[in-house]
Amino acid sequence: MIKVVSESKTFLSDKVELFTESVIRDMTRQATLYGAVNLAQGFPDFPAPAEIKLAAQEAIAADINQYAITWGSKNLRNAVAKHMLEWQRIVVDPETQITVCCGSTEAMISTLLATCNQGDEIIVFEPFYENYGPDAILSGAKPRFVKLRPPSSEDGEWTFDERELRAAFHSATKAIILNTPNNPTGKVFTRTELEAIRDLCVEFNVLAITDEIYEHILYDGTQHISIASLDGMQERTVTINGMSKTFSVTGWRVGWAVAPPAITNAIRKVHDFLTVGAPAPLQEAGAVALGMQPIYYRTLAEGYRKRRDRLIPALTDAGFRCFRPRGAYYVMTDIGAFGFANDIEFTKYLVKEIGVAAVPGSSFYRDPKDGAQQVRFAFCKKDETLDEAAKRLRELRK
């Protein structure tokens, strides 16, 4: 006879009670359920570059199908180091400073697990990409949020108060997560802003963990500056990047973390036991991708600039107040004109009745009330997809 010990015993970790499932991925499921145009999740619906796909096919045909070196194939690590030198003038040793991961998502959680202890604090700008808060919690750290304030006009900039940022730094601060160009706002942090962050990191001996996955998607003359390129920062920065956005291969899951050797050693240990390694043939394709000529990146940015300027007028015409992004491929909007109680009610109506999926703004904030009148749209889509969305959004005017 089996004895029942306790009906109240739970098999779940307390940590999973502290965050919800991904709202972004849930909106994609709802888009599929209701046959809506998916402007929620940030994946392109157009093909990846032919030469990159060919490189992956050739790697598979050449039987590069077994484990790569745990921390990444030599060809890809060499390509990452060369890319950082050419674009940011940062010298990186591919043997001791680069860890290839299963996407930038794994690079981020591997970094936090490798650097954080219970009780450490991680500073995060909000609105933030929804993974950062749960990643901090899973690593035992406590996220501490600093607000980015929306612009007062469509062409304005998202800003932060340097006094609020300074107040967030103290003896328990382990790291600050910086995402530039930023998801969801499209903000590109300026050199002046980065230098202010650098000064605080140096003063309080804090690590900068910077997510630069949108580094080549820039508009209106903005410039991407990696904080690791600033004086005093290379020895205290983990730079995270990947193939997903630049090469339109979000499903390949190839990313990397670049860090000083001691931190890299720790990241490699965590990465090894999390995933062992990223897909070997796709790493070889990644090395080819990073060798693309500068014209590729200019064409990429210009293509997304045209998509941005195609979607924003349609949103404005439908009644949204848009905050024009300077980078990445999302636009945050204000929904106050529609009279809904909150963003959740509005996005449910939008996906079911209008047939367009967007992400509720509250998912990007610690306090849902702060994003209750905002929603995010992704414009990494074909022209015909954006035009169909515009057609459906016109129904909102009725």
Image (cartoon, rainbow, N blue to C red):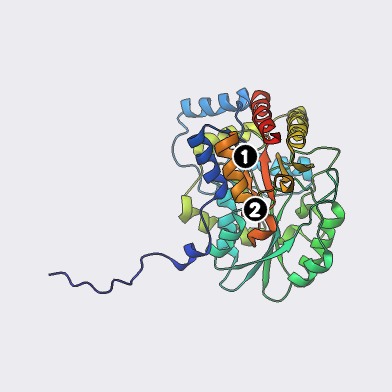
Circle 1: residue type: Gly
Foreground of the two, 102 or 351: 351
User: In this orientation, does residue 328 appear?
Assistant: yes
Identify the residue at image location x=47%, y=49%.
276
Name the spot of residue 360 as percent of width and height, x first.
63, 48
Name the spot of residue 79 as percent of width and height, x first.
66, 39
* Rendered image quadrant of residue 322: top right
Circle 2: residue type: Ala
| Residue furthest out toward the bottom | 171
The alpha-carbon separation of the residues under discs 2 and 1 comes to: 26 Å
Name the spot of residue 268 as percent of width and height, x first.
55, 55
Q: Which residue is mark 2?
A: 341
Is 224 placed left or right of 103 in the picture?
right
Identify the residue at image location x=84%, y=59%.
195
Of labels 2 and 1, earlier in sequence is 1
Badge 1 marks a residue whose secondary structure is loop
Name the spot of residue 368 as percent of width and height, x first.
63, 59
| Residue furthest out toward the left | 1
Q: How many marks?
A: 2
Closest to the camera, between mark 2 and mark 1, is: 2
Foreground of the two, 215 or 98: 215
Badge 2 marks a residue whose secondary structure is loop
Q: Tag 1: Cα neighbours inside 10 Å, few (<14), some, or many (≥20)?
A: many
Identify the residue at image location x=52%, y=57%.
20
Q: Which residue is mark 1?
A: 42
Is 273 placed left or right of 133 in the picture?
left
